[in-house]
Image (spheres, rainbow, N blue to C red):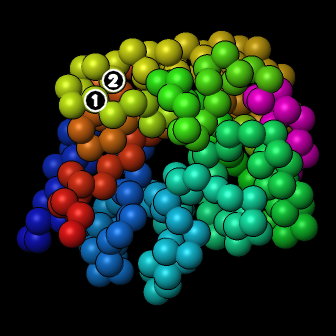
Amino acid sequence: MSQITENVHRLLNEIPKTVSLIAVIKTRGPDEVREAVDAGVRLLGGNYVQETAALLKGLDRTVPCHLIGHLQTNKVRKAVGLFDVIETVDSENLAREIDRRTGESGRGPLRVLIEINSGRETGKTGVFPEAADALAAAVSALPNLRLAGLMTMGSFESDPEDSRRYFRETRRVFERLSKALPRKDGETGMTVLSMGMSHSYKVAIDEGATEIRIGTLLFGPRA
């Protein structure tokens, strides 16, 4: 059994069944991604449109892929045709462009997450927690989008425990919006809280994450 397969099995056995594992495929090779899928990974996460498109060639596309990196408006059309979920909506302008391109594609409503800049770091993507309500209302009003939840990176901390406050604040926003936002017919509401990476996923799960994004722990350090 290879190291990637062992890592996938160990992590899937460790995390609660209610938590989804996204394998982060940034900088990885097609063989590595294929092995992770064969080992049991059921969700992939790509950071870049072109890189992800190349990696997904030849893979079983019954495995959904989420966009977990920043999306520029000039890449939206390609992203809509490639990803099953876009996790990094951080402005009304971007949301409207995704909605427009989704409508043109005829693919049906696209699930999206709002990215929360829980560390309130200038120069980083995501909306500050206090701005989430207005953006969530705007996204919810768009006909071709379905707001499925929230995502956060949090500030990188060498001690995973120091990330707890960022995850906790994002969960509070998630809980507030889950109760406040109206649901469209057939919707299940906000169900996804995407937070936690290789160094912090245990704390994120403890703070309510329903989805974790793991790269290094599955594939090893990037070359």
Q: Is residue 186 left or right of residue 61?
A: right
x then y, percent, for residue 129: 61, 20
- Closer to viewer: mark 1 or mark 2: 1
- Quarter occupied by the C terminus: bottom left
Q: Judge whether residue 56 can be spotted in this image.
A: no
The image position of residue 192, as x and y in percent, is 56, 35
Using the image as rendered, state which of residue 3 and residue 166 is in the foreground.
Answer: 166
- What type is the residue that disc 2 sits on? Ser
Compared with 174, 99 (above or below) is: below
* Magenta stretch encompasses residue 139: yes
The kind of secondary structure the magenta stretch mainly shows is: helix
- Is disc 2 placed on a helix, strand or loop? helix
Q: Position of residue 199 (x, y in %)?
A: 24, 38
- Mark 1: which amino acid? Glu
Residue named by callout 2? 163
Disc 2 packing (10 Å; few <14; some 14–19; many ≥20): many
Horizontally, is 81 left or right of 68 in the view? Answer: right
Residue at the farthest bottom position? 58
Q: CA distance from mark 1 to mark 2?
A: 6 Å
Q: Position of residue 79 (x, y in %)?
A: 67, 66
Dots 1, 2 in contact, CB < 8 A? yes
Q: Residue at x 29, y 81 (%)?
A: 31
Instruction: Tell me if residue 22 comes above or below residue 76 in the rendering.
Output: above
Q: How many marks?
A: 2
Q: Which mark is residue 205?
A: none
Nearer-the-camera pick, 152 or 102: 152
Which region is colored magenta?
A: 135-144
Q: Decide which of tag 1 and tag 2 comes sooner along the chain.
A: 1
Mark 1: secondary structure: loop
Q: Disc 1 marks which residue?
A: 157
Q: Quadrant of residue 32?
A: bottom left
